[in-house]
Image (cartoon, rainbow, N blue to C red):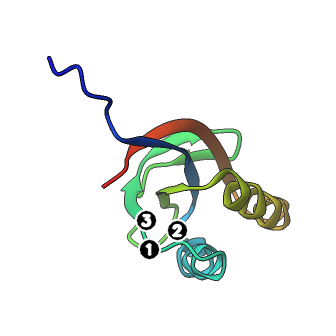
């Protein structure tokens, strides 16, 4: 193991699980906050809004979106998400992480 310090910087990993219908809106939101990278996956599950097993193509489906951002940007995104969660199945959470500083 090296004794040199690992070049990392603090960041926040945000995860948003929502109805697939919100995908374009979420992408637009992240880009409007200056986010330059994210990952989106189709996911299945069950929660407070019922089962979303993707059994009908294009209906009853969820996505999971992840991005690493600054603490300030995560606050801005969470604030904007509060407007969507009143009318759509959506949950968001965040974790403090360390990112390799290349």
Of badges 1 and 3, the one in the foreground is 3
Name the residue at 67% across, 48% down.
Answer: 91
* Gap between marks 3 and 2 measured at Cα: 15 Å
Query: Tag 3, which secondary structure?
Result: loop
Decide: is 67 above or below 49: below
Q: Of helix, strand and loop, which one carries label 2?
A: helix
Using the numbered discs, state the Cα–Cα distance from disc 1 to disc 3 in whole angstroms: 22 Å
Residue at 68% over, 50% down: 71
- Which residue has dot 2 on it? 20
Which quadrant holds residue 46? top right
Nearest to the observer: residue 44 or residue 100: 100
Sequence-first tag of 1 and 3: 3
Q: Is residue 93 left or right of residue 51?
A: right
Question: Alpha-carbon neighbours of circle 1 within 10 Å: few (<14), some, or many (≥20)?
Answer: few
Residue 92: give x, y in percent of width and height: 66, 48
The quarter of the picture where the C terminus appears is: bottom left
Query: Does the residue at mark 1 contact the one at mark 2 (Cβ under 8 Å)?
Result: yes
Quadrant containing the N terminus in the rendered view: top left
Give the residue pinned by disc 1: 58
Say which residue label 3 marks: 38
Vertical position of residue 37 compared to residue 44: above or below: below
Residue shown at 46%/38% (left/top)? 98
Quadrant position of residue 90 = bottom right
Of callouts 3 and 2, the N-terminal one: 2
């Amino acid at each position: 193991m090296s004794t040199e310090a690992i070049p990392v910087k603090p960041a926040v990993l945000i995860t948003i699980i929502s109805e697939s219908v919100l995908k374009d809106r979420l992408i637009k939101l992240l880009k409007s906050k200056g986010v330059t990278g994210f990952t989106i996956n189709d996911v299945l599950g069950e929660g407070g809004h019922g089962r979303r097993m993707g059994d009908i193509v294009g209906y009853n489906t969820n996505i999971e979106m992840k991005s690493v951002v600054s603490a300030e940007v995560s606050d801005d995104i969470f604030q904007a998400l509060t407007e969507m969660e009143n009318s759509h199945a959506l949950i968001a959470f965040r974790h403090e992480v360390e990112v390799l500083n290349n």
